[in-house]
Image (cartoon, helix red, strand yellow):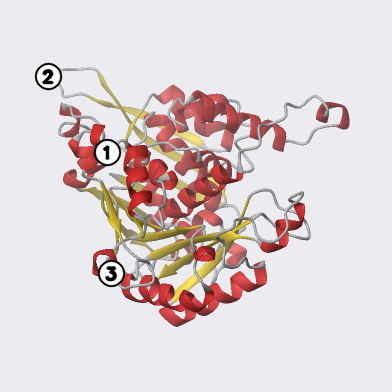
Amino acid sequence: MLLTVTTTRAPATDLGYLLVKHPGKVHSFDVPTGTAYVMYPEATDQRCTAALLLDVDPQRLRAQRDAFDLGQYVNDRPYAASSLLAAALAKVFRSALRGASKDRPELAAEPIPLEIRVPVLRGTADLATRLFAPLGWEVTAEPIPLEPEIGGDSHYLDLRLSGTLRLADALNHLYVLLPVLDDAKHYWVAPDEIEKLLRSGEGWLATHPDKVLIARRYLAHKRALADSALKRLEIDEPVSTEEESQLPVARRSPLAEQRRDAVLTALHDVEAARVLDLGCGGGALLTALVKDRRFTEIVGCDVSSRALEQAARRLRLDQLPERQRDRIKLWQSALTYRDDRLRGYDAAVLMEVIEHVDLPRLPALEAAVFGHAKPRAVVVTTPNAEYNIHYEGLTGMRHSDHRFEWTRAEFQAWASKTADTYGYRVAFRPVGEEHETTGAPTQLAVFEGEA
């Protein structure tokens, strides 16, 4: 599965700075379905081409699929560009997608001549033109013929795009529209996909003549998700005062739902497949994790055996097919003690957990989770004490079992110190509706360790 990006803007080798990949090297990246490689088949001052090659591992691909049918073994996924290639692009060219370049920031903001080629892509020439031409691309989509003895054209295209655009815009077009042309996703489409669509479609999707088609195909024909995305696109467009009063009022999701979705988004951002839900309680987050096929191994841990029994009932473990059940483990474990079973996972989640730990015991939890288990990423959520003034009638803390509740400054100080101690970097996100002075009701931190 191949995609190439070429520029002729001299010096053309500056493309390496924009992609943050040196033209003189072959770069490899492990992705959930195989290995992605970035290489430069040509790199001169006059012309430079970067190639993204995705080598799909059939065994890993089978783990991503849900159906017990022949399609697990005979399919075009390793060869035709699809959401697999889009996901690899998002991981490998993360900075370029954001339009960020430490070494050439002015070039990242400048439209440059670009040529894109995707040699094998499922779709029609007409649809490819409808999708890319309104975005400023000159489109050449040639159907790939079948074997001579069969005759006629296949369902696949050799797609070539040329135009003068910012590299970030070009990559975001590809990230969204490759799965749209293919009309399939290799993973479970959850509500967080709306945010990805709107983020990558910023500045062009709202005005695209086929935005309805794009939203529906990108969101796997899930009508509720597509309608929500389209409604947000309409609301984000400038409107007059008269029009504002006629806009539909969107349902405000409960904070628990927003928190769960924020955690899922964070796990997707760090590309976790094997996940620990530490302090899982009755299994609210576990239920959402199980529905998402990107999570290949899910472990719920709690000190309470009763909570684990509730989680098992909520997940209906005794009714699940064996393959589904094998993805899930429920372990009794105290988070303030080291547990060797918890080592080696992609990510751990502490969702509304740390505030239930006595402050003198918190260093033990830090040592057990960040120091001993040491997952590649840790996602932590906790209440924002500053926001409590907005809860009418609330005196004290939000829950009778909370040992403390932190302000944003206190949480960030703790998280930064913990990150420094155990070799992580940390970033913060608000969860829920933000107030200009008190912030959001929930605060979230994403810790990422060395790859």
Closer to the camera in the image, 149 or 360: 360
State the image coordinates of residue 138 (x, y, percent, origin top left). 51, 36
Q: Which residue is mark 3?
A: 339
| Residue 414, quarter of picture | bottom right
Query: Which tag, 2 or 3, sits closer to the chain's start?
Result: 2
- Give the spatial CA distance, label 1 vs label 2: 52 Å
Disc 3 element: loop
Relative placement, left or right, of 67 versus 194 is: left
Disc 1 element: helix
Relative placement, left or right, of 168 versus 83 is: right
Task: Tell me the number on the disc at residue 317.
Answer: 1
The amino acid pointed to by label 1 is Leu
Label 3: how many Cα within 10 Å (few below 14, some 14–19, many 20+): some
Label 1: how many Cα within 10 Å (few below 14, some 14–19, many 20+): some
**Residue 164 in view (yes/no):** yes
Closer to the camera in the image, 400 or 262: 400
State the image coordinates of residue 367 (x, y, percent, origin top left). 39, 77
Query: Which tag, 1 or 2, sits closer to the chain's start?
Result: 2
